[in-house]
Each structure stands twice: as C-alpha cells, then as structure tokens.
Amino acid sequence: MARAVTTQRKALNTAIAWTIGILIFFPILWTVLTSFKTEAEAIANPPVFLFFDWTLENYGVVQERSNYMRFLWNSVIIAGGSTILGIIIAVPAAWSMAFVPSRRTKDILLWMLSTKMLPAVGVLYPIYLLCIELGVLDNRYALVVILMLINLPIIVWMLYTYFREIPGEILEAARMDGASLKDELLYVLTPMAVPGIASTLLLNFILAWNEAFWTLNLTSVDAAPLTAFIASYSSPEGLFFAKLSAASTMAIAPILILGWFSQKQLVRGLTFGAVK
Amino acid sequence: MATQSSRSAARIMMAPAVFLLLVWMLVPLSLTLILSFKRFLPLRGDRIGERGDGFGDFLLDYITGFPTLDWVGFQNFASFASSGAFTDAVVTTLVIVGGVLAVSVIFGILLAMLLDQPMWGQGVVRILVIAPFFVMPTVSALVWKNMFMDPTNGLFSHLWRAFGADPVVWLSDVPMTSLILIISWQWLPFATLILLTAFQSLDSEQLEAAEMDGAGPFARFFFIALPHLSRAITIVILIQTIFLLAVFAEIFVTTGGAFGTRTLTYLIYQRVLESQNIGLGSAGGVYAIILANIVAIFLMRIVGKNLDR
C-alpha cells in the first residue's frame, strides 16, 4: 500500500478491526476463561469475566472421570497416522505427476479430486458394513486408513502444486554439472520440496484432527478420539460448563496453535493454489 | 525430457494412490447402489450372507449381489423421494447452505476489506478472526449450545434478562437461525482468509488511477475490487457448498435433527444407522451423491481451468 494514510484513519481502522476481531474470537476466549472457573461461577449471573478464583480443578476432573488422555491419544494416532500414511503414498504420486507429466496427468488429478466430492453419507453404510465384516468397527487403525483415503486427494493436490513450482532449470543445471539421479534427488530436489511437504503435513493433520462424521459414526469406546469425546457432553449431564470448557480447551488448543502457523498454506491447500 | 523409463517409473509411483482411491470410490459406491435396490431391514431379521462368519462369505455375497435380500426395483427411491421428510430435508439443507454462504461471503468481503486497511496489530487481529476455523465442529456446536444459547444459564439469556427481555429458547424457537449462526461462525474465517488473500493481490496502482479519474469508493469497489474478487468468491462458494452439504456434527450435538433442522445428510444417517432401513437410506445416499455431483461439476470446471495456466 503506497497510499498515504492519516493517523486518524489508521486509529479508526484499528479500533473497528480489533472490536470485530475480539467479538469473533470471544466464544473461544470465553471457553478458555470458563475452564478456570468453578461450576457456580461458570453460570453466575451477571457473568464474571476475569475476577474469579482461578482454578485448575476442572482439568483434573475431566481427566479423572473420563480418561481424557486415552481420547487424546486416539486423536493423535488417528490424525497423525492418517497424515503420515497419506504423505508416504502421495509424495511419489505427486512427484511423478509434477515432473513426468503425461497427457492423462490432468485427468487423473481431477478424478482424484472428484473422489473428495463423494458425500460421506452416501457411502456411510457400506463403510460401516465393511468395518463390521472385517471386525474393525471402533478400531483406530481402521480410522487411520479411512481418514487417509478421505484426505489423500488433497494431499496429492497440495504436493503437486508445490512440486510444480520447483523450476526444471535447476534440475537441468545439476545434471549438466554431472549430478547422478541420486544426487539430484537427495541434494537438489529434496531440500526444495521439504517446506511444501511440511505444510501439507500440517494442514492435513488439522483436517484429520477435526474430522467428525466418520469418527462419530465408526467409534464408540475404544477408538473414540476427542471429537467423539466432546460430543458425549451433549447429553443433559453435560451441563457442566466449566468441565465442558476444560475438555474443549484441551481439545482445540494444540490445533489452534498449529492452525495459526499454517494460515498461508491453508489458502493454498484448500483452494489448490487457485487464489493468490 | 521424459524418457520411456522415467514414464514407466512415474506410472509405478502413481499406482498406489490411484489404486487406493479407485477402490475407495468403487467399492462403497457399488455397495450403496446395490443396496438401494434391495429391501434390507436388519432389525426385522434380514441378513446378508452368514453374518459374522468371516469376510469370505460376505465377499461372495457381495459379488453375487446379495441374493438373500429381496430386489425391490425403484421402490426405495420412490418412497424416499415421496416422503415429506425428503422435501423438508432438501429445503433445510438448501436454507443452511444458502444462509451460511450469504453470511460468510457478504461479511467475508467486508471483513477482508477491513483487514486489508492499514492498522496497528493487523497480524493479531487476523489471528483472532481466523481462529474459529480450527475449532473442531463438535466443540464449536457444544460451546454455542450450552454457554451461549442455553435458555437459563447461557450468556445470551443473561444478556436478554439484563435488558428486561425474556430469553430466547434458541435451539427450539429459532433453530435454523441458531444453526446458521453456529456454522457461519466456523466458516466466516475461511471466506475471510481466502478473500483477504485475493484483496492483497489487488493492483493498488489501478485503484489510484481510478481514484484520480474521479471514481468514488463505491465505483471503485463495484468496478475494480469486485471483479478482481470474482474468482475467489466463486471458489469460496463452491468449496463451502461441498462441505456445507455434508454438515453433520453441528446438528448431531445440538438439535439431533429435531425442530426442522434435519438436513439430507442427517435424514440419511437416521434412516441408515438409527432406524436401520438400509435400502431406503442407500437410495437417499444415491440422491445425495447426485446432488453433490451437480455442485462438483462446476468446481471441477473452475479448478480445471486453473490448471491450464
């Protein structure tokens, strides 16, 4: 922005933007604050904002009553496992499509994306049935595979757009200098591909962590991740605001932080580079 | 540059991803399609194969088209489409998708425009605005339901009482508004982020030139900014539509489909998993697939064009 802006104008912008920003963020802020209150303070009228007796009690209770760590562990396994497995399968595919494109590459890419459009509910029963028949209902490794397949098209696409930005001239220059295929891969391409792979990992971890349809429908006790654990608070006994808040805070904190790191990749990843 | 050997190497590298996605698409789709023509009520004793007798029997049964189930032709499709629940669900789905889209696109443009202005602490405001997108849907729905919309202890009811008004029983009195509010809160950040990115690539020289030619702020917005944003807006609409057609968790933990908030996704879920009418639910699934594909065709066109650059 080259245009000169008066300080007044800037102050006004700042005031409006901060007000709106805080309003939008408020539900998250309120949840975090409430998690440190006692149940009585959590429902107090008029509500208390900062001046209450801060307590960590709720966090202890959440862990004690429902073994929060197990749900967390399931989330980590399911989101992490599906992301890593997806990357292992997608890197070679995206790599070959970006560097050895053929006439059909574009069709294959678009077809892959089209599987993402398949509404989950349209295939809910078949997957449910297959899980029963294979004896893997409520099994976290089954969810690892399912979420990997759901996110695979996005992983391939993201990696493809990153890989395509690696200039071919650099490769040719390396070859002229006598680099073998191994050198080429190891010392030229890999260092340039690592940032793209890292952002793809990050975004897919976030998507898998928050995925709720399959985790709600295919898990009950053993494999339930945090999405399902939080949903259990929708029963009437869950009207414990402070405990719900503590559980929620623990479920969203890690991903919120990862999310903030990956804002830019989010735009690229979810629009496949179509918005710059 | 590509040699014969590198081409075959490429094919081998692509094979696992292509194969897996092919299986992931074809197996469930074919199952849904077969079952949608069958009468299958497990609760009334309908069985496929020798259930629980191993996967081999199931596979055999699947390949032979589930001979133990009665073939009912298009009966499931007809009864799914003719029930009032279907029409209601389609309307509900469209209202939610339309409502959230309207909110997120209109306010997304306004917010992106605001965030594009010079200010202090821009980075922090941006982080505050984007945050809801990363909140898991079950958390977001429950936080809104309990801590804001609860008719006795929710923050909104405190607020209403403070002004001497009777608190609104949000999720049963104005269920659709409540749901649209909750879901919009989650999706507005996404729209804002995409639109902000598009705004930032707007050529400021062009804007200055227009300003010097005497174009007012509205003219500049409608004739320069909006056309520039059109692609980003289209992408926001299409991507959100795909996700919003499948909204599930938000309804699952708030109303459970009551009070006229049953979307097509939720209706099918109820038919299949709650009332265990598999044939009927599968027919609904086929309808959902057709609906999503109509939307998808448009998205593919746009993304496809982008590939040609």
Image (tube, coloured by chain):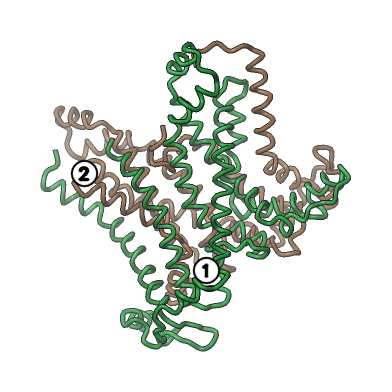
Please state if A165 lies on the left or on the right of B77 as rendered: left
> Dot 2 corresponds to which residue?
A101
Residue A33 x %, y %: 74, 42
Type of amino acid at the residue the image marks with label 2 = Pro
| Chain to which the residue tagged by mark 2 belongs | A
Distance of label 1 from label 2 (alpha carbons): 41 Å
Please name the residue shown 67% across and 14% down the image: A8
Residue B41's disc is none
Question: How busy is the neighbourhood of tag 1: few (under 14 within 10 Å), some, or many (20 plus)?
Answer: many
Residue B294 x %, y %: 40, 56
SS for callout 1: helix
The C terminus of chain A - image quarter: top left
Please state if A257 lies on the left or on the right of B157 as rendered: left
Chain A: its colour in the image is brown
Chain B: its colour in the image is green
Comparing B102 with A270, the one in front is B102
> Dot 1 corresponds to which residue?
B268
